[in-house]
Image: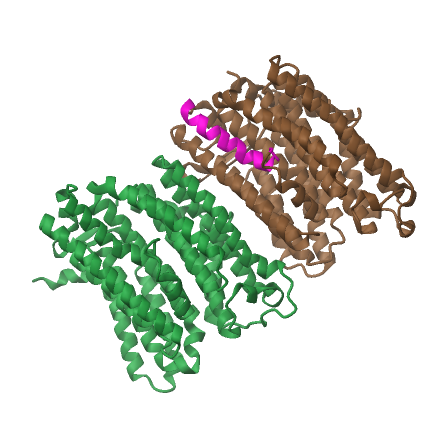
Chain colours: A brown, B green
């Protein structure tokens, strides 16, 4: 068996291990073992990958393996990774690890919670290692459905509404996507479903004009493309901490990843023709998300809207369609994944203590919980792009790439997107100033305690990753860039 | 005449043997034998299923009146398995005091309809086909009124028999036109003679109306909800899975083999029926509170999805159709199994009654959830694969718009399937339905269904085997 399959097998074993688990201790043991194993595997994968590349292996996908599944429809279980997927797998492993520790104190039906959590992990990892469109789509849907129960059962606020809205919209997206996949499969002559092989075939441009928008929108729904982003604020706000982390951190990246690898890569001609429509939509996402965040007073809503803005930037950069901007997009996926997960983890921890998420009801938390306060400031700084943290590297690359497109539309949109940084600064600094530093808003908050060990571990891992990406970006961006370059050459051919 | 050729009809003879054995045993059994009867019946039906599971070489007897293709074995085995599961689920219902004396009838009548379906599938001549169709309908009506003291059941029975007879009448009227126009009723001959004259088109439309009724496509569905609600739950599940599955397969083979020259006419017709069935049934299902009615509408929309495979008219369509029926059998019977056991033990039948069911009956809720996810087409459950294949069959023919409509409808269906899941898992309830201890055969049937839902999709060979047989058609 190919070792990439371990990324699916380990969560599967977690799932199996949770069934007999009875006590909280056993459940935690299974979850931590699984998450740590995934983390080790991911680090090992990075190391193996870099070693393989440095030894001169230049094939598009590494560690490929294929098992025939449904030969008559060319459905194979085929796996393989390039620099983009390795970065995404590493991100997912970090967030799953942090997520397990962030939900350490899960009291309501913990076994079931981790069961669904593992299923979600199977979907996410399976998606990133797949190179066959069918399995990719299957894992995509596997990752979506646990969201309904995770939000509906363990969420807060108007959780049933949010869960239903989220699942119906995302499944709607996947319906568009499936039509797109059929179009790609039959349009290209129906001889393969493997992405690398499909890329070599040409789909007639008339068909591309139908199926590119469907595929792109299908993934775009998950990537919070305006106007299909409305599931995101409600969903994130209602979800329990670890689920928000995984959802905003990893699941939304499935959208960007798929939009690039499936929609743009397989239908480059239509992508070239139609990218302007989606560019405008993503431009709106970026600016609108930022303004939306200003308007909110609930911490989770603020962060959810900021996710819309940042994920919009991912799609925006992908649509710019040059090497630099696309590398930036992938970096932004990693960076946003890490910092938004950190945000949601911190918000969950703060909420667990203050029992409110409203900015107006909090203040001066630095005095009582310095660890969480400092971490929140770091997350905020990463989000508004302070050099040395991951956000700066990603956004800088994106904007440098975006400026390479000289025509008017691209210029105007680039200016708009850059302006959104200023708006980001407004909502980040305002919140930080108010709740972390400002005067104590509630006397009862004086008795609150700071983070305990499992929370520190969860937050520490994420901060370490943010600093690592922000201060030593070269190895990551080089790994991504190497893999992006041939794809972009193919798209622009 | 050489009667030995009749021995080729192995499946039918074997089933007839089972029926006779059970009938005689039922008549002569002693008072002590009564409790054993069901066990014996289950074992005999299981033996019949296993004995006939291996396909043979194709042949025809009686001058093409009766034909056999390897795919028929697959189909009949699927129906056998469905029937067996229904029997397992009826076990405790038939052990209730008021039903004890009717056990024999239940098995005999159900198997009689099954025999009718066998004949329908294997017929090579419209006369034999019609005999099969009637054999599958009339005992069904008696089964629907099985609980003869219940008002609803009697109402359902009357509704069913009247509409069934009417549908058969129209069907045979169509056949008479066909005979008038072509002078033959042999499938093989008809395929070469039919040219598409108006009379033949009329004949086809009249004839197929009878089948549409059995499949319960919109607008031939009006009997469904009432009959499903009125009939005893296990009979409803039989009606919704086995009976429907047989009819839809037959519709496919007849369309492709006999009415192939009319493809230009039936394709648009099926297109409209499929869209109408999926959409309207979904909209109706949204508003149902009673779970049996709910599943009735869900089964109508599922039939609409199956029509996508019929429209394609290709070997891939046939393979995905048979696969869909198999998958639908496991998913739907699991759902009906849970509904029937909850109804029997607590008398509760509405979605609100299921509030908080997970607290008191975690296993049943889990099975119900799996089956609903499978019906909705969520991976990794098997319903996802069957939907993918059916859509794939339609997309292969370039029917992207139809696939798109169907896919949008899956979102609507997901909403109402999730409503039940929401009731079981999300909604808090101080007094959920009592904890249920179900009978062993029922538990076994649910285990089989769950295993089917979880495993079949992961095994590529199931679909490929069906595919390899249907490519010969």
Quarter of the view holding residue B392: top left
Q: Vertically, is A212 above or below B290?
A: above
Q: Vertically, is B362 above or below B376?
A: below
Q: Is residue A224 magenta?
A: yes
Q: Is residue B357 magenta?
A: no
Observer-nearest residue: B332 or B232? B232
Boundaries of the magenta span: A205-226
Q: Position of residue B28 (x, y in %)?
A: 29, 84
Observer-nearest residue: A127 or B195? B195
Q: Which residue reaches farthest left?
A: B1
Q: Position of residue B117 (x, y in %)?
A: 27, 61
Q: Which residue reaches farthest front?
A: A295
Residue A452 in sight here: yes
Q: Quadrant of the N terminus of chain A?
A: top right
Q: Horizontally, is A255 left or right of B464 in the view?
A: right
Observer-nearest residue: B66 or B186? B186
Quarter of the view holding residue B221: bottom left
Q: Position of residue B388 (x, y in %)?
A: 43, 43
Q: Horizontally, is B196 left or right of B249 in the view?
A: left
Q: Position of residue B82 (x, y in %)?
A: 38, 61
- Give the prevailing secondary structure in the magenta stretch: helix
Q: Vertically, is B417 above or below A484?
A: below
Q: Horizontally, is A338 left or right of B34 in the view?
A: right
Quarter of the view holding residue A225: top right
- Residue at horizontal 40%, vertical 47%? B461
């Amino acid at each position: 068996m190919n070792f990439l399959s371990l990324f699916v097998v380990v969560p599967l074993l977690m799932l199996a291990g949770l069934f007999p688990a009875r006590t909280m201790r056993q459940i935690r043991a299974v979850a931590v073992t699984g998450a740590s194993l995934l983390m080790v595997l991911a680090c090992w994968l990075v190391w193996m990958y870099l070693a393989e590349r440095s030894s001169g292996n230049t094939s598009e996908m590494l560690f490929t393996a294929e098992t025939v599944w449904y030969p008559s429809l060319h459905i194979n279980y085929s796996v393989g990774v390039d620099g983009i997927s390795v970065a995404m797998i590493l991100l997912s492993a970090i967030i799953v690890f942090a997520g397990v520790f962030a939900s350490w104190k899960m009291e309501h039906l913990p076994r079931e919670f981790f069961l669904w959590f593992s299923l979600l992990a199977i979907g996410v990892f399976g998606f990133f290692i797949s190179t066959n469109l069918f399995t990719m789509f299957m894992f995509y849907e596997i990752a979506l459905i646990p969201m309904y129960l995770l939000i509906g059962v363990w969420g807060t606020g108007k959780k049933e509404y949010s869960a239903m809205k989220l699942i119906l919209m995302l499944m709607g997206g996947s319906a568009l996507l499936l039509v797109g996949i059929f179009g790609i499969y039959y349009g290209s002559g129906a001889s393969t479903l493997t992405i690398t092989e499909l890329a070599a075939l040409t789909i007639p441009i008339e068909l591309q004009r139908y199926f590119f928008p469907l595929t792109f929108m299908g993934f775009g729904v998950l990537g919070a493309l305006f106007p299909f982003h409305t599931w995101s604020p409600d969903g994130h706000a209602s979800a329990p901490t670890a689920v928000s982390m995984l959802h905003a951190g990893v699941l939304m990246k499935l959208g960007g990843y798929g939009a690039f690898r499936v929609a743009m890569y397989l239908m480059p001609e239509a992508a070239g023709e139609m990218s302007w429509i989606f560019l405008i939509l993503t431009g709106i996402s970026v600016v609108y998300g930022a303004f939306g965040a200003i308007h909110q007073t609930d911490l989770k809503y603020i962060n959810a809207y900021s996710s819309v803005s940042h994920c919009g930037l991912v799609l925006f950069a992908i649509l710019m369609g040059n090497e630099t901007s696309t590398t930036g997009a992938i970096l932004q996926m990693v960076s946003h994944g890490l910092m938004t997960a950190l945000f949601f983890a911190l918000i969950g921890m703060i909420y667990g203590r203050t029992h409110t998420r409203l900015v107006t009801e909090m203040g001066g938390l630095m005095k009582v919980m310095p660890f969480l306060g400092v971490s929140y400031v770091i997350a905020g700084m990463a989000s508004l792009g302070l050099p040395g943290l991951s956000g700066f590297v990603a956004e800088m690359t994106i904007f440098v790439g975006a400026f390479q497109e000289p025509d008017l539309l691209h210029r105007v949109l680039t200016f708009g997107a850059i302006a959104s940084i200023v708006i980001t600064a407004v909502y980040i600094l305002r919140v930080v100033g108010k709740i972390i530093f400002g005067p104590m808003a509630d006397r009862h908050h004086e008795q609150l305690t700071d983070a305990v060990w499992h929370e520190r571990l969860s937050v520490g891992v994420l901060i370490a990753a943010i600093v690592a990406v922000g201060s030593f970006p070269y190895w990551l961006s080089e790994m991504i860039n190497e893999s992006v370059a041939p794809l972009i050459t193919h798209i622009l051919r | 005449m050489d009667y030995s050729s009749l021995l080729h009809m192995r499946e039918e003879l074997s089933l007839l043997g089972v029926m006779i054995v059970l009938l005689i045993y039922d008549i002569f059994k002693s008072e002590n034998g009564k409790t054993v009867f069901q066990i014996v019946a289950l074992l005999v039906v299981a033996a019949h299923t296993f004995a006939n599971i291996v396909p043979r070489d194709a042949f025809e007897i009686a001058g093409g009146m009766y034909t056999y293709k390897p795919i028929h074995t697959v189909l009949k085995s699927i129906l056998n398995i469905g029937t067996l599961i229904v029997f397992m689920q009826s076990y405790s219902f038939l052990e209730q005091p008021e039903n004890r004396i009717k056990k024999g009838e239940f098995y005999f009548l159900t198997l009689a309809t099954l025999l009718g379906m066998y004949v329908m599938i294997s017929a090579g001549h419209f006369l034999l086909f019609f005999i099969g169709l009637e054999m599958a309908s009339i005992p069904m009506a008696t089964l629907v009124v099985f609980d003869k003291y219940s008002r609803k059941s009697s109402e359902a029975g009357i509704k069913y028999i009247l509409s069934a007879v009417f549908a058969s009448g129209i069907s045979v009227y169509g056949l008479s036109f066909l005979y008038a126009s072509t002078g033959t009723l042999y499938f093989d001959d008809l395929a070469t003679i039919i040219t598409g004259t108006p009379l033949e088109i009329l004949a086809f439309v009249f004839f197929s109306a009878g089948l549409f009724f059995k499949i319960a496509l919109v607008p031939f569905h009006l009997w469904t909800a009432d009959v499903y609600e009125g009939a005893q739950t296990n009979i409803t599940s039989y009606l919704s899975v086995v009976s429907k599955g047989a009819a839809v397969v037959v519709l496919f083979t007849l369309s492709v083999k006999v009415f192939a020259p009319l493809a230009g006419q039936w394709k648009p017709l099926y297109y409209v029926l499929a869209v109408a069935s999926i959409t309207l049934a979904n909209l109706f299902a949204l508003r149902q509170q009673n779970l049996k009615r709910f599943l009735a509408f869900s089964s109508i929309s599922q039939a609409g999805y199956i029509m996508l495979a019929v429209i394609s008219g290709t070997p891939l369509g046939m393979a995905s159709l048979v696969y869909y029926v198999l998958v639908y059998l496991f998913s739907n019977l699991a759902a009906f199994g849970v509904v029937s056991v909850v109804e029997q033990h607590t008398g509760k039948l509405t979605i609100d009654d299921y509030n908080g069911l997970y607290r008191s009956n975690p296993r049943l809720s889990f099975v119900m959830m799996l089956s609903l996810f499978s019906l909705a087409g969520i991976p990794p459950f098997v319903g996802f694969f069957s939907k993918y294949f059916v859509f794939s069959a339609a997309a292969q023919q370039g029917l992207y718009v139809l696939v798109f409509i169907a896919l949008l409808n899956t979102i609507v269906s997901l909403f109402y399937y999730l409503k039940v899941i929401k009731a079981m898992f999300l909604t808090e309830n101080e007094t959920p339905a009592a904890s249920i201890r179900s009978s062993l055969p029922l538990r076994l049937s649910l285990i089989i269904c769950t295993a089917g839902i979880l495993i079949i999709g992961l095994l590529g060979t199931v679909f490929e085997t069906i595919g390899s047989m249907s490519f010969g058609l």
